Image (cartoon, rainbow, N blue to C red):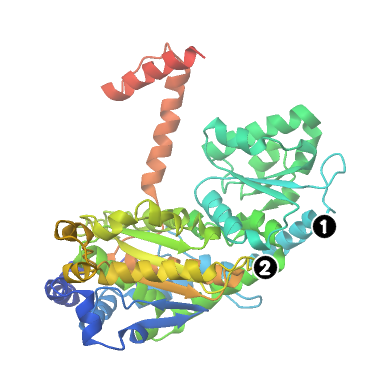
């Protein structure tokens, strides 16, 4: 296919049909859908790569699903999927392939991109990562004084922080508990200061993750870490305590890092899709190469399912199409991700970048401005904590929020018998969101009449329930890939480029332009009146320090 093609989805027959169906679906409650379809739960459940995903509590009918599949056909979603896996330049605004899926190909699986065979390159980097991780974990790699490394600090931002930080937290159970892992991304000096607190320089390794080795926030934090190390151990220690994940050998060498300890990746790997590349070096050091490969296998299992499964049972395809249904036809603007697993505390934040940076677009591939909703707002918090903060709004608020529940059947810490209680809470919340509680049911409990309206739960709040056996590396990889491909499906339906992020670039450029203004009180200002006044106020307050 011509990856530059972009079609307005609102002009398709399927979109018109879905608009009609939405009118009738809005009038029907999930209680009615379940009553009309006694076997709805199993019928609307799909399984792939060890994940069981129940879509039955989505406000959707068989007619809606058929029309959504027609929309995918009319918008060329599957053709675009095949173009992605083939290495075509589907990121048209940057003229790049989109091949994060190549990062988890098994060894020996061929893949050619722009005339170059890339699978071998990917596995060579993985081999070097594995060798380095084993050396650090075993104590063979030592710091400048010969002491073993006990602390690893990953310095990055965006995809080079959210991915590794989320994966480390998710897989902490499998990590080397004799080592400390910390993640620095914010240019707020508090972040690097707190990360260094209590650590000994002789035992600390820094991983500086920046493709260009020029990202402002990352390099600012890296220089601060370098100053801290050099003050204690001298300049010659830098090469034993810093490694880089980058493609810019010249800048890496200028920093003082031995380029033999530089781990590269490729321009066809977007930052938010890079946690299974060399960007995941800190994750690999934490859990070991074998566990990291298990995670890659989970990614690949979902890739293969998305690529080859029949559309009728294609899990990411259905998930993505239902996200479009909620956003555009049921006018639901946000999705709450609710992992009932404390180790997934950073998963909602990770998905915020994956979904909102990918599909937060208002211009189609053909340059035309969209006149329909794209990218939903994603947010969330682990259960059961969220139940005691924002679930009140989920149940009785004026805005309907779509919800994704994530639950594992087996506890990683089986010392205390609490997993059943955790599961009961997750299942109960999904059921109450769907079915609510009627006034009659409230009265039947003996509730005084004046309190009845306050205790009614409207229900009819859609949710998806994702269930897996254990939070193991394979399951984590499959879960992330599920969302990656769901995001892809949504973007393909909307006809947007899910793989650029020009909005991010403009903000960084503006910050670079404002920085000299902040540092020179005599510099004339000629911006808007708000920004100029804030600059002067900041300078006055800053000088008082």
Task: Please give left or right for residue 252 compared with residue 508 in the image.
Answer: right
Earlier residue among tags 2 and 1: 1
How many numbered dots are placed on residues in this image? Answer: 2
Q: Mark 2 highlights which residue?
A: 291
Q: Residue at x 24, y 73 (%)?
A: 59
Q: Which mark is residue 138?
A: 1
Q: Quadrant of residue 324?
A: bottom left
Q: Residue 386, position in %: x, y?
A: 41, 55
Q: Residue 237, position in %: x, y?
A: 79, 36
Is 39 situated above or below 115? below
Is 140 situated above or below 238? below
Q: Quadrant of residue 66?
A: bottom left
Task: Please give left or right for residue 58 compared with residue 389 in the image.
Answer: left
Q: Residue at x 17, y 71 (%)?
A: 440
Is 104 situated above or below 264? below
Q: Residue 48, position in %: x, y?
A: 48, 80
Q: Which mark is residue 271?
A: none
Between marks 2 and 1, how big is the CA–CA gap? 16 Å
Label 2 secondary element? helix
Is 48 situated above or below 321? below
Task: Please give left or right for residue 238 compared with residue 411 in the image.
Answer: right
Label 1 secondary element? helix
Q: Name the residue nearer the viewer: 361 or 86.
A: 361
């Amino acid at each position: 296919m011509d990856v530059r093609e972009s079609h307005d989805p609102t002009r398709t027959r399927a979109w018109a049909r879905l608009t009609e169906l939405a009118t009738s679906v809005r009038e029907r409650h999930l209680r009615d859908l379940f009553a009309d379809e006694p076997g709805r739960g199993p019928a609307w459940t799909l399984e792939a790569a060890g994940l069981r995903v129940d879509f039955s509590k989505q406000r959707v009918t068989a007619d809606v699903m058929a029309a959504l599949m027609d929309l995918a056909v009319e918008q060329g979603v599957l053709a675009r999927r095949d173009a992605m896996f083939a290495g075509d330049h589907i990121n048209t605004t940057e003229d790049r392939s989109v091949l994060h899926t190549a990062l988890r190909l098994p060894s020996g699986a061929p893949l050619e991109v722009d005339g170059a065979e890339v699978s071998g390159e990917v596995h060579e980097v993985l081999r070097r990562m594995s060798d380095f991780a084993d050396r650090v974990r075993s104590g063979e790699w030592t710091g400048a004084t010969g002491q073993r490394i006990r602390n690893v600090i990953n310095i990055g931002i965006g995809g080079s922080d959210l991915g590794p930080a989320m994966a480390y937290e998710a897989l902490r159970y499998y990590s080397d508990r004799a080592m400390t892992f910390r993640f620095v991304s914010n240019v707020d000096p508090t972040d690097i200061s707190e990360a260094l607190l209590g650590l000994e320089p002789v035992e600390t390794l820094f991983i500086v993750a920046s493709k260009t080795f020029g990202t402002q926030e990352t390099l600012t934090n890296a220089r601060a870490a370098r100053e801290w190390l050099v003050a204690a151990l001298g300049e010659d220690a830098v090469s034993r305590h810093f490694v880089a994940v980058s493609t810019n050998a010249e800048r890496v060498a200028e920093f003082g890092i031995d380029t033999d300890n530089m781990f590269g990746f490729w321009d066809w790997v977007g930052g938010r899709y890079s946690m299974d590349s060399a960007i995941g070096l800190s994750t690999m050091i934490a859990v070991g190469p074998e566990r990291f490969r298990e995670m890659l296998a989970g990614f690949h299992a979902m890739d293969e399912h998305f690529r080859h499964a029949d559309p009728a049972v294609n899990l990411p395809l259905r998930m993505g199409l239902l996200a479009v249904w909620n956003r555009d036809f049921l006018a639901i603007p946000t999705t709450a991700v609710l992992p009932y697993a404390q180790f997934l505390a950073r998963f909602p934040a990770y998905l915020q970048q994956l979904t909102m940076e990918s599909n937060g677009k208002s211009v189609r591939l053909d340059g035309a401005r969209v006149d329909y909703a794209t990218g939903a707002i994603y947010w969330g918090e682990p259960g059961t904590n969220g139940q005691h903060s924002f679930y009140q709004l989920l149940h009785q608020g004026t805005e309907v929020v779509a919800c994704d529940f994530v639950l594992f059947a087996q506890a990683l810490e089986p010392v205390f018998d609490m997993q059943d209680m955790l599961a009961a809470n997750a299942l109960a919340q999904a059921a109450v969101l769907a079915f609510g509680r009627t006034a009659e049911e409230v009265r039947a409990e003996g509730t005084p009449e004046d309190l009845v309206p306050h205790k009614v739960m409207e229900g009819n709040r859609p949710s998806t329930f994702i269930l897996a056996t254990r939070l193991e590396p394979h399951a984590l990889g499959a879960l992330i890939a599920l969302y990656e491909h769901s995001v892809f499906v949504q973007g393909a339906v909307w006809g947007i480029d899910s793989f650029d992020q020009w909005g991010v670039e403009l903000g960084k450029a503006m910050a670079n332009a404002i920085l000299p203004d902040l540092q020179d009180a005599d510099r004339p200002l000629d911006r808007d009146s708000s920004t100029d006044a804030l600059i002067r106020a900041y300078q006055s307050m800053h000088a008082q320090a």
